[in-house]
Image (cartoon, rainbow, N blue to C red):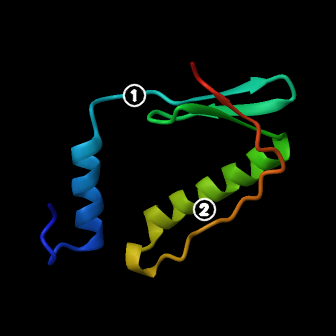
Amino acid sequence: MVPPAASEGETMARTHEHNHRGPSTGQVHRFGNSVATHLPGMAQTIYMSAKEARKLARALNAAARSVDHEPFTASDCTAQIPFARTDIHREL
């Protein structure tokens, strides 16, 4: 349990330490005319169009720049990415 006086950043760090079980690998690959991604801890592979993948890449880059150049409390880095397809392949 995190003490009430902990900052949000400290809480996030403690949660990460608690949940981290060692190195893991995510995957991004092409699947037909889609870009597919599978991240550790997720039970699904998510498929998106090339356009959606580019939007996601821009959002990830913007968030990374925010981490490098802004204090957390000054950041307003949030992106909404509408996905046209919702077909998610569940791993068996």
Q: Residue at 82% of width from left, 44% of height from top?
A: 85
- Relative to 23, is 32 on the left or the right? right
Mark linked to residue 24: 1
Residue extending farthest to the bottom is 74
Task: Kindly report the distance in space between the C-alpha atoms of the residues bearing marks 2 and 1.
Answer: 24 Å
Residue 47, given in percent of the width and then of the height, sits at: 74, 35
In this picture, is 65 found above or below 26?
Answer: below
Residue extending farthest to the top is 92
The type of residue carrying mark 2 is Ala
Judge depth for marks 2 and 1 and give the one in front.
Answer: 1
Q: Residue at 60% of width from left, 55% of height from top?
A: 61
> In this figure, which residue is indicated by the disc labeled 2?
62
In this view, the residue in front, 11 or 69, is 11
Contact flag, marks 2 and 1 (Cβ < 8 Å)? no
Q: Residues within 10 Å of mark 1 (few under 14, many from 20)?
A: few
Residue 20, given in percent of the width and then of the height, sits at: 28, 39
In this picture, is 59 found above or below 41?
Answer: below
Q: Residues within 10 Å of mark 2 (few under 14, many from 20)?
A: some
